[in-house]
């Protein structure tokens, strides 16, 4: 029992929320508002995620298959270049500093500067995550249960 009087397990609750966020394409902001809203309805001692990160962590979602991309800091008005993993190289042999080459405008940028200035985004392989999730028999059963409602 998740807590006294609970009609479902915590895992069932988290799976239903996760399924909703995927099927309705909810933003991170909206998902976190929803989590906080649900949390307000729970007894004070019940632990419940308040962030998307915690939701994914509690569901043991695997981030193994993520890819980081960088955007050319020249900005979309000047350059629409996207810098991917294969465009990164070491500044000089043996150094730990990485530089990124924008194939669009041919300029080279310091990787640290790009991530610090938020010129980056991460793509998660949702198919992989859902497959990992469904490979877990426990979760499969919980999902079947929650689909009945
Ligand atoms: Zn560029």
Image: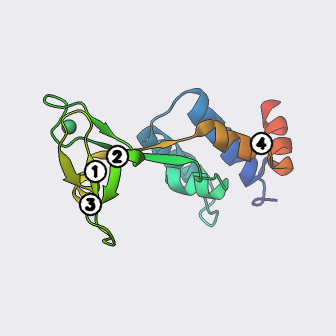
* Mark sitting on residue 100: 1
Whichever of labels 4 and 1 marks the residue nearer the N terminus, that label is 1
C-alpha distance separating marks 4 and 2: 34 Å
* Mark sitting on residue 134: 4
**Residue in the picture at 52% in, 29% down:** 25
Q: Foreground: 71 or 137?
A: 71
Do the residues bearing badges 4 and 1 touch, measured as CB atoms within 8 Å?
no
**Residue in the picture at 55% in, 57% down:** 54
C-alpha distance separating marks 4 and 3: 36 Å
Quadrant containing ligand 1 reads top left
Q: Which residue is outermost to the front?
A: 93
Quick one: SS at disc 2?
helix
Q: x and y percent of residue 144 in the render?
A: 84, 36
Do the residues bearing badges 1 and 3 touch, measured as CB atoms within 8 Å?
no
Q: Foreground: 149 or 7?
A: 149
Q: Quadrant of the C terminus?
A: top right
C-alpha distance separating marks 2 and 1: 6 Å
C-alpha distance separating marks 3 and 2: 14 Å
**Few, some or many residues within 10 Å of mark 1 (<14, 14–19, 20+):** many
C-alpha distance separating marks 1 and 3: 10 Å
């Amino acid at each position: 029992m998740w807590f006294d009087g609970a009609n479902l397990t915590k895992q069932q609750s988290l799976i239903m929320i996760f399924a909703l966020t995927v099927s309705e394409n909810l933003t991170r902001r909206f998902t976190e508002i929803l989590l906080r809203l649900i949390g307000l309805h729970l007894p004070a001692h019940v632990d419940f995620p308040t962030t998307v990160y915690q939701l994914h962590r509690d569901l043991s979602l695997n981030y193994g298959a993520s890819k980081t991309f960088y955007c050319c800091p020249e900005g979309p008005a000047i350059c629409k270049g996207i810098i991917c993993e294969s465009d990164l190289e070491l500044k000089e042999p043996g150094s730990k500093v990485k530089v990124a080459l924008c194939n669009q405008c041919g300029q080279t940028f310091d990787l640290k500067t790009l991530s610090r200035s938020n010129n980056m985004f991460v793509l998660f392989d949702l198919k992989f995550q859902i497959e990992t999730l469904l490979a877990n028999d426990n979760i499969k059963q919980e999902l079947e249960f929650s689909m009945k409602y």
